[in-house]
Amino acid sequence: MDNLLLQTVDQKTDTEIAGQGQVFLEKAEAITIVDDTTNALAIAELEEIAFAKKSVEMHRKRFTQPLFALQKAFNKHFADLSESIIKADEILRTKVLQFGKCKTRTVSRYEIVDETKVPSEYWEISDCKIKAVLSAGITEIPGLRIWKEKTPVIGGSNFFQSGGSNG
């Protein structure tokens, strides 16, 4: 990955940025603020550093924005490709569940109903994190609607059972 990155990134600009960063670092380490004059120098240096940070961010985005756009296009392409597969799965799962002669399990589901009420530990809405606490038996999270539903267990030797569900 590093080799690909090195071949892609503008080496001249990167060398300039790295050199500028080293100069900023040396100046920051050397500055001792003892009066208004040295404080003003430090503030001026911070303004230059802020400008440099913005420049680095713009330089980074020149490379990352096309990649994000490409990733978004691929994700849409494959979502479109799998749309009929997902729909077929949903239809057959519903039919198998309605027939009632398959092994089932109860799973917890959720949807966000009020983002402002979701506790801070869930602010980065993490499907894995939420599913983990649901599996641990949590039944209420402010801002989420949580429900249980049966879903067929597909695969395994005990798929068909004469008694309907196990769950």
Image (cartoon, grey):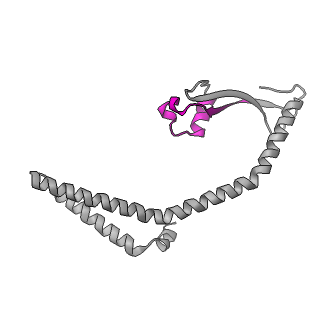
| The C terminus: image quadrant | top right
Q: Residue at x 75, y 52 (%)?
A: 82
Q: Residue at x 16, y 58 (%)?
A: 41
Residue 155 seen by the camera: no
Q: Is residue 20 magenta?
A: no
Picture coordinates of residue 79 (x, y %)?
A: 70, 53
Q: Residue at x 36, y 63 (%)?
A: 55
Q: Residue at x 17, y 59 (%)?
A: 30
- Write down the region rendered in magenta: 106-134
Q: Is residue 82 left or right of residue 59?
A: right
Picture coordinates of residue 58 (x, y %)?
A: 42, 63
Relative depth, front residue between 154 and 27: 27
Image height of 50 relative to 107, above or below: below
Picture coordinates of residue 137 (x, y %)?
A: 62, 25
Residue 163 seen by the camera: yes
Picture coordinates of residue 120 (x, y %)?
A: 47, 33
Q: Is residue 110 magenta?
A: yes
Q: Quadrant of residue 139?
A: top right
Q: Quadrant of residue 145?
A: top right
